[in-house]
Image (cartoon, helix red, strand yellow):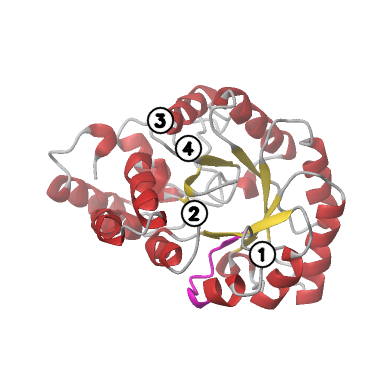
């Protein structure tokens, strides 16, 4: 169902903190035009942690509306509360989304059995395809391969976004799941190697800025043309690292505004705007490496 470059879309916000739907529509159209294969709406990069429940739902619904069925929308529906995850998922049942991205419960630090029961309970309450999301550096809990394998046997759990940074997970999961179970990278820096090992896609922060090149890289890699894929990867490598110089999505929102992709780049507390030191580093990168490139193809 999903392969290639999937963008972890930012949520544009006005100076007063309100959602900027004009910019959101612009971003959706930008990704349709530049071969992004799907959009994750209100994931980590979309600041799911600081949106109200109404905002969370409304951003997803607006994203579906703006997409006009031209690109699949994956809704971020995860929570550290099983009942809240179920509530939002059920609310989106007839919204037009193609799947849900459900993160490992954060802060609670559940056991492997607790995580298994959490995701199983969600899947039992919906027909929407579910994609697991493992990012232990943020959640404090690591969804282990053996638990993923157990969950993969549930019909509407169709894959996992694996963002632990441990590439050995690809083989440890792939060898024991159905061939259609999706292995999706959650890390731009290692995405190419992840696909080379058998992954099918990346949910990408970098794709917010350069969706066309990310899409090309993934297409080459999926078709086993790793020479061409590696060439693009090297072009993007400095950006991939810089986008995590501070907590995501601080750098990506600053850069999207810098190149004119959005007009509103407010970020909500407890996250703060990009520091002056790192703004200077970004400007040096842009000036020295990409000064002769076109605005929306700066890499």
Q: Earlier in the sequence, mark 1 or mark 3?
A: 1
Q: Residue at x 66, y 64 (%)?
A: 178
Q: Which residue is mark 1?
A: 178
For marks 2 and 1 on the same chain, the one whose residue lies earlier in the sequence: 1
Between the C-alphas of marks 3 and 4, the distance is 11 Å
Q: Is residue 193 above or below residue 252?
A: below
Identify the residue shown where x is 20% and y is 33%: 294
Q: In this picture, which residue range is highlighted in magenta?
A: 160-168
Which one is in front, 112 or 180?
180
State the SS at label 2.
strand
Nearer to us: label 3 or label 2: 2
Q: Residue under circle 4?
A: 266
Residue 15 in view in this figure: yes
Q: Residues within 10 Å of mark 2 (few under 14, many from 20)?
A: many
How far is the residue under mark 1 from the one under mark 3? 40 Å
Q: Which residue appears at 46% of the width and 51% of the height?
A: 204
Q: Which residue is mark 3?
A: 262
Asked if residue 161 is among those painted magenta in the image, a careful observer would answer yes
- Mark 4 residue element: loop
Q: Is label 1 or label 3 in front?
A: 1
Q: Quadrant of the C terminus?
A: top left
Q: Which residue is mark 2?
A: 201
Count the numbered circles shown: 4
Left or right: where 118 falls relative to 97:
right
In the image, residue 5 lies in the stretch drawn in magenta: no
State the residue at coordinates (30%, 54%): 239
Query: In x, y percent, where is residue 260?
Result: 32, 30
Q: Tag 3's secondary structure?
A: loop
Instruction: Say whether residue 276 is left or right of residue 64.
Output: left
Q: Nearer the viewer, mark 4 or mark 1?
A: 1
Residue 282, image x, y percentages: 26, 50
Q: In the rendered structure, are the residues bearing label 1 and label 3 in contact, judged by CB atoms less than 8 Å apart? A: no
């Amino acid at each position: 169902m999903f392969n290639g470059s999937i963008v972890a879309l930012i949520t544009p916000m006005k100076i007063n903190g309100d959602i900027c739907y004009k910019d959101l529509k612009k971003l959706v159209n930008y990704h349709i035009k530049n071969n992004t294969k799907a959009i994750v709406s209100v994931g980590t990069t979309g600041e799911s942690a600081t949106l109200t429940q109404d905002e969370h739902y409304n951003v997803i619904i607006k994203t579906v509306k703006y997409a006009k069925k031209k690109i699949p929308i994956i809704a971020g529906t995860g929570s550290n509360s099983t009942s809240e995850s179920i509530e939002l998922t059920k609310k989106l049942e007839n919204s037009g989304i193609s799947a849900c991205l459900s993160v490992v419960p954060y802060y609670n630090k559940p056991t492997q059995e607790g995580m298994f029961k959490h995701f199983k309970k969600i899947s039992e309450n919906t027909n929407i395809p579910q994609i697991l999301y493992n990012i232990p550096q943020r959640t404090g809990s690591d969804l282990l391969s053996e638990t993923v394998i157990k969950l993969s046997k549930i019909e509407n759990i169709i894959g996992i976004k694996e963002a632990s940074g441990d590439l050995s997970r690809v083989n440890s999961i792939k060898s024991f799941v159905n061939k259609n179970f999706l292995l999706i990278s959650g890390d731009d820096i290692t995405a190419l190697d992840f696909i080379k090992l058998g992954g099918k896609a990346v949910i990408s922060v970098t794709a917010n800025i350069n969706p066309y090149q990310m899409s090309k890289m993934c297409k080459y890699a999926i078709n086993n043309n790793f020479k061409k894929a590696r060439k693009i990867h090297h072009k993007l490598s400095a950006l991939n690292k810089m986008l995590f110089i501070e907590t995501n999505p601080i750098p990506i929102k600053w850069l999207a505004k810098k190149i004119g992709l959005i007009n509103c780049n407010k970020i909500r507390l407890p996250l703060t705007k990009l520091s002056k030191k790192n703004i200077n580093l970004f400007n040096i990168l842009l000036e020295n490496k990409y000064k002769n490139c076109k605005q929306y193809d700066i890499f």
